[in-house]
Amino acid sequence: MLNISNKLTIPDNEIEISAIRAQGAGGQNVNKVSSAVHLRFDINASSLPAFYKQRLLSTQDQRINKAGVIVIKARQYRNREQNKQEALNRLKELITSVTLSRKKRVATKPSRSSQQKRLDRKSKQGRNKALRRKVFD
């Protein structure tokens, strides 16, 4: 069972984890041992609340395919258990990022004094540039 928060948990039967062979260099051991982990989590078939499902499906994350399945590959460690834990942590992080509600931005206006300072700086800069011009008799 994966605990996302105090109120939100994901049962183990909804998360599909399979061991795969890691890619890249590693000598003879890489050809024998399946230490990398391939995690699949179907958003539509999960027990997540509908609000979280909608937000997950609307995010532009490359780990979520068009069918609504989260695919995470973990192959950082040489140990399968550490890779499994890493994949679960990444899934938890992804779902947690969706559960947090963003604060609505409040539009602000610049103060009168800041507007006046800006105009004063502009006019001063214009005077300086005017003084750099050629002088004609």
Image (cartoon, helix red, strand yellow):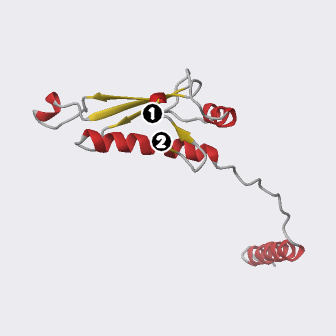
Image quadrant containing the C terminus: bottom right
| Furthest residue toward top | 67
Amino acid, disc 2: Leu
Asked where in the image residue 35 lies, by quadrant, the reply is top left
Q: Is residue 112 above or below residue 51?
A: below
Residue 119: % across, % down: 84, 72
- Looking at the rendered structure, which numbered label has been put on residue 116? none
- Taking depth in this image into account, of 31 and 120 the one nearest to the observer is 31
Q: Residue at x 70, y 51 (%)?
A: 102
Q: Residue furthest right?
A: 112
At mark 2, the secondary structure is strand
Q: Mark 1 highlights which residue?
A: 12
Q: Residue 107 occupies which quadrant of the picture?
A: bottom right
C-beta proximity under 8 Å, tags 2 and 1: yes
| 15 in relation to 136, above or below | above
What is the number of callouts on the image?
Answer: 2
Mark 2 or mark 1: which comes first in sequence? 2
Indicate the amino acid at tag 1. Asp
Give coordinates of residue 3: x percent, y percent. Answer: 50, 45
- Say few, some or many: other residues with alpha carbon within 10 Å of mark 1 (under 14 / 14 to 19 / 20 or more): few
Q: Which residue is mark 2?
A: 2
Q: In the rendered view, would you say 67 is above or below 49?
A: above
Does residue 118 appear anywhere in the picture? yes
Residue under the point 56% across and 28% down: 46
Element under label 1? helix
Q: Nearer the viewer, residue 127 or 51?
A: 51
Residue 4 screen position, x and y as percent: 53, 46
